[in-house]
Image (spheres, rainbow, N blue to C red):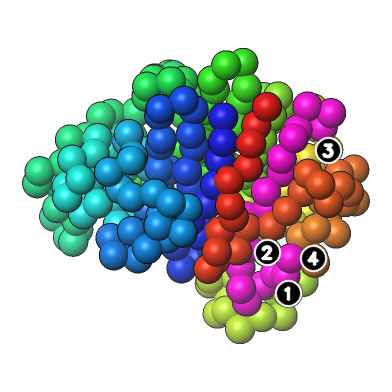
Amino acid sequence: MRLASLGSGSKGNATLIRAGDTLVLVDCGFAVRETCERLARLGLSPADLSAVVVTHEHGDHIRGVLPLARRYHLPVHMTFGTLRAISAPNSRHSLEGVTVQEVRPGRAFSVGDLAVMPVPVPHDAREPCQYVFESGGRRTGVLTDLGSITTHVTEAYSACDALLLECNHDPAMLAAGPYPFSLKRRVGGDLGHLSNQQAGSLVRVLEQHRLQHLVLSHLSEQNNTPAHALEAIAAAGLDDAARVRVACQQQGFDWLEVN
């Protein structure tokens, strides 16, 4: 397995998971042209993709999904709740010409060489879920956009070989930052986004000896810094520059091998 990112943050998210000839794009928060440019940095084009898997309907995750899928004839996997959200009467999204496969949280499905487990998470979306991908006995988890760590989340992600983990904000920076109070309450709430310390609480109970790569993701540009995020993860027992890195908004990160 391999994983890479086209970008991670509030301005757009897209993650690539590869196993054999299968290449899955998790979310696409960029317009089609920008997505193509970001794929080209990795020597890829949309024609190389096998499918798009969607976590939830927020714009920084779904902006380019349907236009990309329509243009390149890609199947899109999403929950029924997410589908309902983007097909609501006031939605600006069009499903015309797009093949949608329904995802049921907790029920695994396959995309080529990848087994995919959808994991329901607490977030302020219609039916959000994150994913654990498995191939050849290796497991890669994608876990962003959730406001709290549930027992189910802990169980689903404890035995990953690679993990893309949200470290959205530092609580002190969020409290002192420019957001209005209502947005601060949303971001820091149980249906919002993980703080560095919440991410650290999950890292403490992971099978750390198994984890080859931990990528800290979805960092807020206003309410966090890479140094704050890395410090919280180091305090949780994983202070290893060879295994821990930070995904950025502009560059994401290059391919990481999961052996």
Q: Residue at x 10, y 43 (%)?
A: 97
| 155 lies above or below 184 | above
Q: In the figure, residue 113 lies in which quadrant?
A: top left
Q: Is residue 241 visible?
A: yes
The count of marks equals 4
The region drawn magenta spans 208-226
Name the spot of residue 144 as percent of width and height, x first: 56, 48
Q: Name the residue under label 2.
A: 169
Quadrant of the drawing holding the N terminus: top right
CB atoms of marks 2 and 1 within 8 Å: yes
The residue singled out by tag 3 in the image is: 204
* Residue picked out by circle 4: 228
Name the mark on residue 173.
Answer: 1
Dominant secondary-structure state across the stretch colored magenta: loop
- The span from disc 3 to disc 1 (Cα, nearest Å) is 23 Å
Front of the two marks 2 and 4:
4
Residue type at mark 3? Arg
Label 3 residue SS: helix
Instruction: Tell me: 89 left or right of 156.
Output: left
User: Which residue of the protein is positioned furthest toward the left in this rendering?
Assistant: 96
Q: Can residue 200 be seen in this view?
A: no
Where's residue 119, x and y in %? 51, 30
Counting residues from the start of the chain, the first of labels 3 and 2 encountered is 2
